Image (cartoon, rainbow, N blue to C red):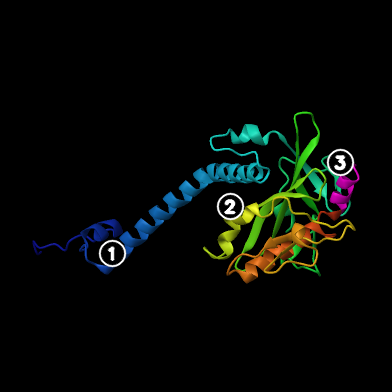
Amino acid sequence: MSDTQSPEPKGVIARFLAASPDSVGKTIFIAVAVCLVASMIVSAAAVSLRPVQEANKLKDKQINVLQVAGVYEPGIDVAQAFAAFEPHVLELATGEFVDDRFDPATFDDIAAASDPELSEPLENDPAGIGRKAKYRVIYLLRDENGALDKVILPIHGYGLWSTLYGFIALEENGNDIYGLQFYQHGETPGLGAEVDNPRWKALWNGKKLRDESGNLQITVAKSMPAAGPDFYIDALAGATLTTVGVDNLVKFWMGDAGYAPFLAKLQAGEI
């Protein structure tokens, strides 16, 4: 009987540990393990930060409402200032508030545009949005005496590269524009992104939506319309398609398919 005995077979883990650091198997294993750990860390961070991201998104939206209404100042308590606004869920077709059916504080009108029960497809779609939510959350701002001061209406539509989301602020008469502001878009920096330029945004102040006959005349273009300067906003320099997109989306939302029924009630003193 030989004194030399065959070594006992090693287990999988032992064989792995004994393998050369340069072996293909160990290299692949380490790479996969690092990727798995990294993905778990990233996923955990994304989940844990989601509430913070949502809170920041809401705060940014509130800031834009305050800015378009002309009441924002650096350092202001955003939540406190925003509390002065009255949110209402508006049924576009009737121009009536339906706060008894939907909670204005939680209703997501952008998400509603993808819900077949809360939206409708558009055959005439100059804004390029595909579907239109039947309900939108709007904001009323009153003065210290309780009288209506401004109305903030959400608007959106397609520009050149992206859908632009923003607000238009109207005076209490529902016809004079106080301001327009976009809070989300992906237009070309230096061209279509000039929608964020304070000088261009200032052009909207004091313009009118409709003429004395009630015809929608507001125009964003390179040349002044026949209706005159009260209805004209100069085009964005070098951004023809973004200009057309803004012109289309504003006309769409201020027209019969958008807020026209509500604005009629507002001008009749029914709001």
What is the number of the mark on residue 198? Answer: 2
* Residue 231 visible in rendering: yes
Residue 170 is a magenta residue: no
- Mark 2 neighbour class, 10 Å CA radius: few under 14, some 14 to 19, many 20 or more: few
Q: Residue 271 is drawn in which quadrant?
A: top right
Amino acid type of the residue that numbered disc 3 sits on in the rendered structure = Ile
User: Badges 3 and 2: C-beta atoms under 8 Å apart?
Assistant: no
Q: Residue at x 64, y 70 (%)?
A: 241
First in residue order: circle 3 vs circle 1: 1
Residue under pointer 1: 27
Viewer-closest of 136 and 264:
264
Amino acid type of the residue that numbered disc 1 sits on in the rendered structure = Thr
C-alpha distance separating marks 3 and 2: 31 Å
Helix, strand or loop at disc 2?
helix
Q: Residue 119 is drawn in which quadrant?
A: bottom right
* Position of residue 39 measured from the top left corner of the image (x, y, whole percent): 43, 55
Viewer-closest of 103 and 254:
254
Q: Residue at x 39, y 54 (%)?
A: 38
* Position of residue 268 measured from the top left corner of the image (x, y, whole percent): 91, 45
Amino acid type of the residue that numbered disc 2 sits on in the rendered structure = Pro
C-alpha distance separating marks 3 and 1: 70 Å
Q: Nearer the viewer, mark 3 or mark 2?
A: 2
User: Badges 3 and 1: C-beta atoms under 8 Å apart?
Assistant: no
Q: Nearer the viewer, mark 1 or mark 2?
A: 2
Q: Residue at x 72, y 40 (%)?
A: 105
Q: Residue at x 17, y 61 (%)?
A: 7
Residue under pointer 3: 271
Identify the image quadrant of the N terminus: bottom left
Helix, strand or loop at disc 1?
helix
